[in-house]
Image (tube, rainbow, N blue to C red):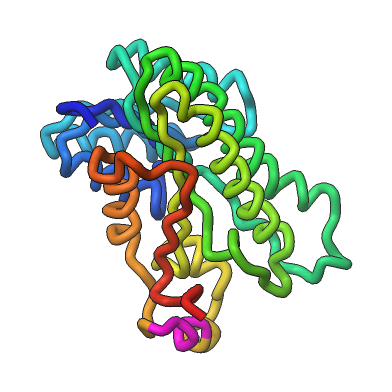
Amino acid sequence: MTNHPVVLITGALTGIGRAAAFAFAGENARVVVSGRRVEEGRTLAAELIALGVEAEFIQADVRFEDDVRNLVDGAVARFGRLDVAVNAAGAEGESAPLVEQTPERYAAVFDSNVLGTLLSMKHELRVMNAQGSGSIVNISSTMGARGAAGASLYVASKHAVEGLTKSAALEAAAFGVRVNAVAPGPVETPMLNRLLADAERKAAFLSAVPLKRAGTPEEIGDAIVFVSSGKSSFMTGEVLRINGGRTAS
């Protein structure tokens, strides 16, 4: 990354996306944060500006191409270029056995996690390929490399995100652009608490993590900064798994 790189983050209003915004602010990046909720987005941008960095909120829903196009073009109009994009927008969907899943539930997960990632990369690469530089980091999950009973749609969507990441990396390499993914395990976010609604269930789930705890959003944010930076300049098409040892065996 150059001095004061321009960073675009989708799904920036909560959890990992929000932590990434503050991690990049700590590196003096210029940050464009995006999400669907205007008031929360403006508040986040104000918090980042209060840290002494340039920041702007642009409303977008990654399920809709016009929103994504306007988001990327707005970031470039504001700062003149796009150095890093973090595609963190996503949805977990409803947990249920596969035989109970429906086309509507499929669309609710895949439109955000897969179509949203595809559209985001389409327009980010439009800019980065023309620049001849850039780094994209998609957010996958431990579930992008394994199965989980009751979570077939979420699991399938994250497998798809990793496939998109690898394919896009091969296409973008000729332009000097890198595309990677970060795949967190359980992280203390609102999404984790929605999935594990009661304390007993959450404790049992975390007991299966070799490090015996959930990760923090800040730990994942720091990893995203590393993967996007010049410190990982020979890394593309890869998935960095950060899960306390969950996939070690």
Question: Residue at horizontal 46%, vertical 69%?
Answer: 186
Look at the picture and state if 195 lies above or below 219.
below
- In the picture, measured across the screen, residue 61 lies left or right of residue 223, that is right
Look at the picture and state if 32 lies above or below 209.
above
Most foreground residue, 35 or 26: 26
- In the picture, measured across the screen, residue 165 lies left or right of residue 127, that is right
Look at the picture and state if 176 lies above or below 243.
above
Look at the picture and state if 178 lies above or below 131.
below
The residue lying furthest to the right in this view is: 99
Residue 37 point in image, percent of width and height:
47, 37
Question: Residue at horizontal 11%, vertical 33%?
Answer: 52
Most foreground residue, 45 or 152: 152
- In the picture, measured across the screen, residue 141 lies left or right of residue 228, that is right
Most foreground residue, 59 or 88: 88
The magenta region covers: 205-210
Residue 23 inside the magenta-drawn segment: no
Quadrant of the rendering where the N terminus is positioned: top left
- In the picture, measured across the screen, residue 169 lies left or right of residue 111, that is left
Residue 229: name its quadrant: top left
- The mark tally for this picture is 0
Residue 184 point in image, percent of width and height:
45, 61
Residue 182 point in image, percent of width and height:
43, 53
Can residue 39 be seen in this snapshot?
no
Question: Residue at horizontal 61%, vertical 57%?
Answer: 92
Can residue 205 be seen in this snapshot?
yes
Question: Residue at horizontal 55%, vertical 84%?
Answer: 201
Residue 41 point in image, percent of width and height:
38, 36
